[in-house]
Image (cartoon, coloured by chain):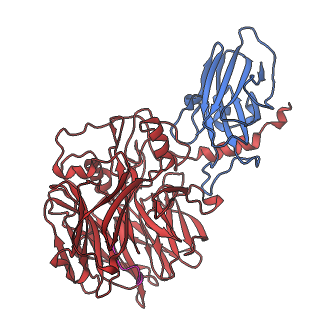
Chain colours: A red, B blue
Amino acid sequence: MDRREFIRALIAGSAAAAAHHAIPFAAASSRLPVSDAPPDWAIGFRGLSDDLSLTEMKVEGRVPRECYGTLYRNGPTLYERAGERYQHWFDPDGMIQAFRLGPAGVTHEGRFVRTRKFLEESKAGRFLYDGAGSQVADPQPASNNDTANPANINIQPLAGELLALWEAGSAHSIDPATLETRGRKIWSDELDGVPFCAHPKYDDRGDLWNIGSVPWLGAPKLVLYHIRADGVLQKTKLHTLDFAGYIHDFVLTPSYLVVLNSSAVFGTGETFVDRMHWDPNRASQLLVFDRNDLSLVRVIEVPAAFVFHFGNGWEDASGLHFTACQYENADITVSSMRKMAQQVSGPLHAPPELMRYDVDLRGGQCSISALAVPMEFPNYDLRRPFNPQTLLGTGEQNVSESGLASALVSVNPQSGKFSRYDYGNGVIVQEPLYLKGGAGDYAMHAFLDYEKHRSGIALFRIDRLNEGPVMTATMDRVLPLGFHGCFLAA
Amino acid sequence: MKLATTRTALITTLAAIGAATAGAADLTVSVVNMETTSGTLFISVYDDAEAYTASNSDAAILSGRGKVRGEEYKFTLHNLEPGQYAIKMFHDENDNGEMDNNMLGIPKEGYGFSRNGGRLGPASWEDAVIDLQEDMSISIKLR
């Protein structure tokens, strides 16, 4: 055979592409010990190893007819294999929880997302791949960023299916009825395996918009997605960023996508999380993209900021506006989420505060004001995504013994009207969702009662949060604390 | 040295280069963990760190391809001079003649390296190099 037949261009070309393939996850193992006596709240990070079959929950109160439907939630769930535990809340495999509300009551079931990682590691009986914040013993080489995709952050509907979402890889398609995993969602050949972040946004037509952040592959990049309500990719665009700030969520307004390139910047480190370095002296950037062609139309510097989640965005004659649950720094990710997963007590981060951003696009100015409300997991009425409106969220993490939220809170960023219901110590409140009602709207959230070792969901009238839940459904199962989800009406 | 397939291997077009050398050794390679049981493996063998790192196939001592028709692909490199070697390969699963990447340049098809080293992306020469002094069998797990 002639050596000219060698696959010079092919091998060279492919290897050149791979050569830029940086390593978001990391090397040698340095596991930390697990405390012998974890605090009571730590059962929320104990984890599960098996799917959860259908069970009936104990209902107190009544499920209003307009609240019949299913609450789907996702979160890190499988913490341990072969005696080895993950060390960061970002890492355990995702499980989809389904709470079904109907005339017969409330049921619950849970099923792990069958990612490639989950299937391979189940077969091997041990962890094979390093996580975003954890190193495992004898890790196997990963093919690409999807190899270690745990699909563990969010679950959202699109065109009759559910998408189990991570932020550094593909979404996974989930059957809403059976919770079975149908496989990775591939929007197009060129987008196969490209990060699809965990917080897509719906516009008022039901179209889905999203970002994909790639700070770990050479020059930092951001992918923008517009997907029609029927699930078909409409357009996409790849941007190169000025610096590799951590990006988790974004804001959608009638005309723009707004992305905060944060001041937690990727540098060197053993793990993806270790590589995140908070730089208080580096201005963050608000990147404003035109929805029409996904082009970058404005870059506005703002003081160093770290934000996981944003409220909704709206526009008026003065510009665009949105809210953000903003932290003083990136300690929650680099420190607190480790302590939580390791089930150890210790000082946690300062809680996030709800901030209002008012952006004058013509002048390129932004004013930021504190609403004096500690809040996380903000949610709003998806029927009015572009109206200023009351936000729901979790609160009181600044006073609870766990350092996690013990209260359901609401605040209107226009009027400042604030309402809350605090369960007090013993209960951890999880992301509330906004449900359309008949006589009035409802808030629904999952919770963990770590004193009684049970999990549940609670339903509130939004205009009467302080009166407490109108319905709770509980069960003896202890579900690991999760992140995000959606409610689909029956 | 000579490159040939073993009995378990299927058709290969890998090259035969050089002549038998005293003290030469055979290196048998088993390729596993392929996503599909079809397509073509593109294989390069290097004895030089610089050429390996640069994927300079002109400087590869061997390059070739083999049709995949099962869950394992096995071949033997015959009569290699004792020394250091590293192998890199990719699996052209759809037989379009190239390694498919997404818009970020991340491979969408399987690839692998001798000693299965590295964490993500290409293994370095140090992670992939084999010190061949006598007949040896290795397994390359595609990632």
Say whether residue A206 is left or right of residue A409.
right
**Mark count:** 0
Task: Work out whether residue A128 or residue A277 is closer to the camera in this orientation and state it.
Answer: A128
Is residue A297 among the parts visible in the rendering? no
Q: Position of residue A135 (x, y in %)?
A: 39, 40
Outermost residue, right side = A2
Residue occupying image coordinates x 65% and y 18%: B83
Image height of A293 relative to B123, above or below: below
Magenta residues (range):
A379-386
Q: Position of residue A20 (x, y in %)?
A: 58, 47
Main SS, magenta region, reads loop
Outermost residue, front side = A104
Is residue A489 among the parts visible in the rendering? yes
Q: Position of residue A35 (x, y in %)?
A: 20, 40
Outermost residue, top side = B22
Q: Considering the image in quadrants, where does the C terminus of chain B appear?
A: top right
Image height of A107 relative to A299, above or below: above
Say whether residue A15 is left or right of residue A224.
right
Q: Is residue A145 magenta?
A: no
Q: Considering the image in quadrants, where does the N terminus of chain B appear?
A: top right
Task: Work out whether residue A8 or residue A379 is closer to the camera in this orientation and state it.
Answer: A379
Task: Work out whether residue A159 or residue A307 is closer to the camera in this orientation and state it.
Answer: A159
Image height of B84 relative to A378, above or below: above
Residue occupying image coordinates x 63% and y 55%: B102
Residue occupying image coordinates x 61% and y 45%: A18
Q: Position of residue A252 (x, y in %)?
A: 45, 76
Q: Quadrant of residue B125?
A: top right
Task: Work out whether residue B85 or residue A195 is closer to the camera in this orientation and state it.
Answer: A195
